[in-house]
């Protein structure tokens, strides 16, 4: 391992897994383990399990697993070395940087540098007479110079290679510029600036690094090259995992965060005194973004246009926000307006008034359902009541349900009993559907065991034996020498288990004892999950030593069969003889 093992152990010792995971997952004790809702897939009953005993975690729903480093890497989107460093930093351990391959980290740092230099270039250009068109645009939209600087806004000059020339002069290579996605390569093999004649918005992550850009076209060019050009995913940027202005909002949103649609809406709201505002980046709202927000805030206000598209967006977002722990409110803006437009015509106080009147998600859905209902018409009324009952049934809070049932009963003169029984009926149907869905989710996790070990299909029995053998050795490393003599790694039938067995024998032989951290940079997350599942399962049974012997036998039989069927020049007689031998050995073993 590239980072000295005593350093890894020291970091593990100072960061116990419960403390590392609990800021992200609400953990509840179950026996000697802890369980919670998995942060890596969407679920309603906890299948994410933490094993404090050996410092590992595993999700029975999606199959991810590992140790504190794997967890930190997955949740913070860091590679192995970066997560080791982050945890080291948190516990005050310093790591000497020279002995390991940190080429990925170097590339990331270079991309940050390129992005910073690029943002500077766009901003300085905007402050020259040639770039005044950019400054004019932002000031025309009501932004002060202070705001423009705060967000690092700029504009990209027209032309194909202004940025390339500038970055070259600063000593950056074409390859790194491509990796940062600030330039592109044509089919003819020439390079060009990705952003040309656009208003530029840098995207900054929560640690304060510029990770990408959003470039908006001039109004007259919108049809030509698309209204927005955004950075594609790069080693430092994943658009589904970031939010525009989260770097500022994170310091102001502990009570409430406001989600709007566009970058200009965010900037206008920050300037008007609402620094707790963010926007999704170009695409629709994602699960990862919900996770990010729920780490910093208690309540989210969805601010959307009153049009049909806005309503759809609310419906989608509220589905994603279920079980996020965030309370959800909806602020409906007057028809046809976005927050930026609204603030140009109205005072911040007026927006504050709308914010205070934001309704909770149930009220919002009820209001939307009531649109176009004719209360004089019995059919229309009944249609609304049915919709309302479905909305109430969808609410998980029992007190809230009771409250809305009361309101509905009062308003339409229907007995509470009738509404309650209808609500309960719907909830029961939903619960059954949910259960069905969850069962099928457990059967087909995101990483199915067949995907991790595709050879299982050809040799299911031997694969199971290999897994049991590995599980036993993880628990009883003292059986290792005996197992190794009978079954050297090359006899393992499936390649994955052969690799794991080899790693296992290396670590046991070196006298280090079993610690899955040893594997965390040598196996993929799904493979590590597979290993952790084996480690924490109960495959060993009552008599591990006997089970171990049986496993070895099964594996050797299958291996022999495989070797023999694979050798093409084996005569039919030889093959039959071999088979007979195998069967004989098997029978002997069973007596
Ligand atoms: Zn999961």
Image (tube, rainbow, N blue to C red):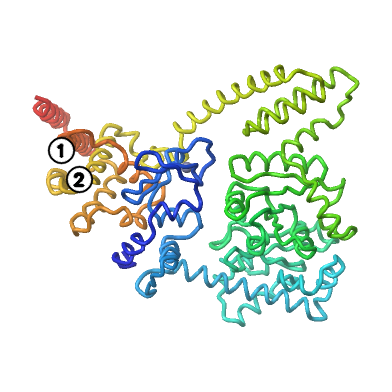
- In the picture of the structure, the residue carrying the numbered disc 2 is 476
> Which residue of the protein is positioned furthest toward the bottom in this rendering?
169
Name the mark on residue 522. Answer: none
Q: Secondary structure at mark 1?
A: helix
| Residue shown at 62% from the left, 68% from the top | 210
143 or 100: nearer the eye?
Answer: 143
The answer to whether 191 is drawn above or below residue 368 in the figure is below
Using the image as rendered, state which of residue 545 and residue 221 is in the foreground: 545
Is residue 168 at least partly visible in the picture?
Answer: yes
Q: In the displayed structure, does residue 572 sit left or right of residue 53? A: left
Q: Which residue is mark 1?
A: 545
User: Is the C-beta of the residue carrying label 1 under 8 Å from the nearest atom of ligand 1?
Assistant: no
Residue at image coords 78%, 51%: 355
Q: Secondary structure at mark 2?
A: loop
Q: Earlier in the sequence, mark 2 or mark 1?
A: 2
- Please identify the quarter of the rendering in which residue 6 is found: bottom left
Using the rendered view, name the quadrant where residue 381 is placed.
top right
Q: In the picture, residue 157 is in which quadrant?
A: bottom right
Q: Residue at x 77, y 67 (%)?
A: 199
Residue 144, horizontal then vertical, whole percent: 81, 71
Real-space Cα distance between discs 2 and 1? 9 Å
312 up-or-down from 411: above or below: below
From this view, report whether residue 131 is shown above or below residue 285.
Answer: below
Check mark 2 vs ligand 1: CB closer than 8 Å? yes or no. no
Q: Nearer the viewer, residue 367 or 158?
A: 367
Q: Could you tell me residue 34's position as x and y percent?
A: 41, 43
Give the percent coordinates (x, y) of residue 515: 29, 54
Q: Quadrant of the N terminus?
A: bottom left
Assess whether mark 1 and mark 2 are in contact (beta carbons under 8 angstroms). yes
Q: Local crowd at mark 1 within 10 Å, few (<14), some, or many (≥20)?
A: some
- Considering only vertical position in the picture, is 581 above or below 489? above
């Amino acid at each position: 391992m590239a980072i000295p093992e005593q350093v890894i152990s020291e970091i593990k010792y100072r960061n116990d897994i419960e403390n590392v995971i609990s800021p992200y997952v609400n953990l509840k004790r179950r026996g000697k383990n802890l369980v919670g809702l998995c942060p890596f897939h969407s679920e309603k009953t906890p299948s994410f399990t933490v094993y404090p005993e050996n410092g590992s975690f595993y999700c029975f729903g999606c199959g991810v697993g590992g140790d504190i480093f794997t967890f930190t890497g997955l949740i913070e989107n860091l590679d192995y070395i970066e997560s080791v460093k982050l945890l080291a930093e948190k516990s005050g351990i310093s790591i000497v940087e020279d002995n390991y391959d940190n080429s990925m980290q170097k590339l990331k740092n270079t991309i940050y540098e390129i992005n910073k230099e690029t943002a500077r270039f766009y901003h300085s250009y905007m402050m020259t007479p040639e770039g005044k068109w950019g400054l004019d645009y932002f000031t025309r939209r009501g932004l002060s110079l202070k705001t423009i600087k705060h967000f690092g806004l700029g504009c990209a000059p027209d032309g194909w290679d202004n940025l390339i020339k500038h970055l070259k002069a600063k000593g950056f290579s074409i390859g790194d510029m491509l990796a940062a996605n600030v330039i592109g390569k044509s089919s003819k093999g020439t390079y060009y600036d990705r952003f040309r004649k656009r208003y530029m918005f840098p995207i900054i992550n929560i640690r304060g690094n510029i990770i990408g850009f959003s470039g908006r076209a001039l109004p007259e060019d919108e049809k030509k090259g698309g209204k927005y050009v955004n950075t594609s995913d790069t080693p430092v940027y994943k658009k589904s995992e970031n939010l525009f202005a989260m770097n500022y909002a994170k310091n102001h949103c502990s009570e409430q965060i406001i989600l709007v649609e566009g970058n200009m809406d965010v900037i206008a709201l920050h300037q008007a005194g609402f620094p707790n505002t963010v926007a999704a980046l170009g695409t629709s709202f994602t699960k990862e973004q919900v996770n990010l927000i729920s780490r910093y805030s208690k309540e989210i206000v969805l601010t959307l246009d009153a049009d049909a598209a806005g309503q759809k967006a609310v419906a989608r977002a509220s589905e994603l926000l279920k079980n996020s722990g965030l309370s959800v409110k909806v602020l409906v803006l007057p028809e046809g307006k976005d927050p930026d437009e609204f603030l140009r015509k109205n005072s911040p106080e007026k927006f504050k008034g709308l914010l205070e009147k934001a309704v909770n998600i149930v009220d919002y859905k009820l209001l939307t359902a009531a649109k176009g209902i004719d209360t004089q018409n019995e059919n229309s009324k009944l249609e609304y009541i049915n919709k309302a009952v479905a909305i109430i049934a969808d609410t998980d809070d029992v007190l809230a349900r009771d409250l809305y049932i009361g309101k509905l009963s009062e308003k339409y003169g229907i007995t509470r009993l009738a509404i309650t029984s209808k609500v309960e009926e719907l909830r029961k149907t939903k619960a059954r559907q949910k259960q069905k869905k969850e069962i099928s989710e457990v059967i087909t996790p995101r990483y199915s065991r067949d995907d991790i070990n595709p050879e299982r299909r050809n040799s299911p029995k031997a694969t199971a034996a290999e897994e049991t053998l590995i599980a036993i050795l993880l628990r009883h490393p003292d059986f290792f020498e005996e197992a190794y003599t009978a079954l050297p790694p090359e006899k393992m039938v499936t390649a994955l288990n052969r690799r794991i067995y080899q790693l296992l024998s290396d670590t046991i032989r070196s006298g280090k004892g079993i610690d899955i951290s040893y594997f965390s940079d040598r196996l993929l997350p799904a493979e590590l999950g597979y290993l952790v599942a084996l480690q924490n399962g109960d495959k060993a049974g009552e008599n591990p030593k006997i089970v171990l012997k049986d496993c070895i036998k099964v594996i050797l039989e299958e291996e022999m069969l495989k070797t023999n069927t694979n050798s093409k020049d084996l005569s039919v007689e030889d093959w039959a003889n071999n088979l007979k031998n195998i069967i004989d050995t098997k029978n002997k073993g069973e007596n």
